[in-house]
Amino acid sequence: MPLLARTVHTPLAIDVRRGAVAGLGALLADRRISAGGEVAVVVGPGQGERIAELIAPGLGRADVFTVAGGTLEAAHELGEKLRQRSYDAVVGIGGGKTIDTAKYAASRYAVPMVSVATSLANDGIASPVASLDHDGGRGSYGVHIPLAIVVDLDFVSDGPDRQTRAGVGDALSNLSAVADWELAHAVRDEPIDGLAVTLARTGAEALISHPGGLGDDAFLTTLAEALILGGIAMAVCGSSRPASGGCHEISHALDLLHPGAGSHGEQVGLGALFCTFLRGDQLRFGQLAAALRRHGLPVRPADLGLTDDDFVAAVLHAPHTRPDRYTILEHLHLGADAVQERLAEYLGALSMPAR
């Protein structure tokens, strides 16, 4: 008998709205994640007291742990605390560093994890990956996808606009990542997962054409959904392929060669636009450039304080950051002079009036 369907692990609940944190206890009970509130709540520094007050009525039996997140050491320390009591779930509340710390610790000790995002800087709110710093740099670790995902737009709106812009860049870069995956499938017969492609591209398509801005709840909801769909797409195929292509290779290279030049989302957005230009997709290039500009994201190396030579060096180094990944950068295999020439053409295209 043929296999008629596949089982896909997805969150039990997705809740994107204002005031979502205050309703966390009811959501956990309703979804039978934790009827009695026996959970470990993980928060980042600076916001713990406010969050503890909001969740107290519904999660009176919770333990609250504050983490200086984002490091492998912090994740291991949190894991040791989780061992001291039997918890129904770990609830990570905060930005990407706090959530990644909670995801890693929860996965290591086989405790279900609930992601409660107070910022929308990247797709880590829903992805099966935790990015954590360690002595040797930064590593990406496979973790379980969150059991539930909550995004509180009150916190998102109160946070820095730059973080939200970064999330826009990260979500839009999925369009380039998917195009790279399709290229690898066509040229090298690399297996491609149509469901993962659909999820990643659908969220980004909704975002690229949305007329709203950072102060618009409808736009923020679309952004949150795009980031969540990107994370689920990775879980569906068991790889970062639908959300990471040449765009991310360029960003990884910038992290190595020019650390701190920009946020992850700013760098992958720029990388996605340049890779789209290299593919010769003029329609998508125009759409992506317009969206990045509309939301105040970098479109030129100079927007990140980089010289053209800095960016050329990053593009040349980019393929070395992911030797197993085939993208437009590996496909064209451009030398230094060719990259310099294509960058000049790219900058010229950006200077042309939109049609």
Image (spheres, rainbow, N blue to C red):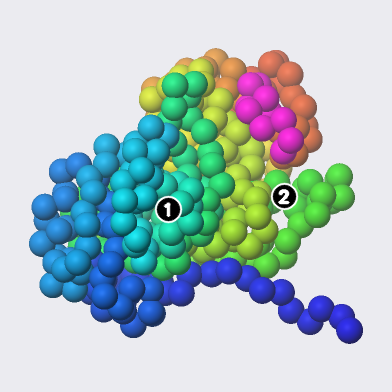
| Mark nearer the N terminus (1 vs 2) | 1
Q: Residue at x 86, y 45 (%)?
A: 188
Quadrant where the N terminus sits is bottom right
Q: Residue at x 28, y 52 (%)?
A: 42
Q: Of tags 1 and 2, which is closer to the observer?
A: 1
Rendered location of residue 13, percent (x, y): 42, 74
- Circle 2 SS class: helix
Mark 1 to mark 2 CA distance (whole Å)? 31 Å
Label 1, on which residue?
A: 106
Residue 321 part of the magenta-drawn span: yes
Left or right: residue 188 versus residue 11 is: right
Q: Amino acid at mark 2?
A: Trp
Q: Amino acid at mark 1?
A: Ala
Between residues 48 and 36, which one lies in front from this camera angle? Answer: 36
- Circle 1 SS class: helix
- Can residue 219 be seen here? The reply is no
Rendered location of residue 76, percent (x, y): 40, 38
Q: Quadrant of residue 193?
A: bottom right
Q: Quadrant of residue 67?
A: top left
Dot 1, crowdedness within 10 Å: few (<14), some or many (≥20)? many
In the image, the segment drawn in magenta is 316-325
The answer to whether 338 is drawn above or below residue 153 in the figure is: above
Left or right: residue 319 versus residue 110 is: right
Label 2, on which residue?
A: 181
Q: How many marks?
A: 2
Q: Residue at x 68, y 28 (%)?
A: 319
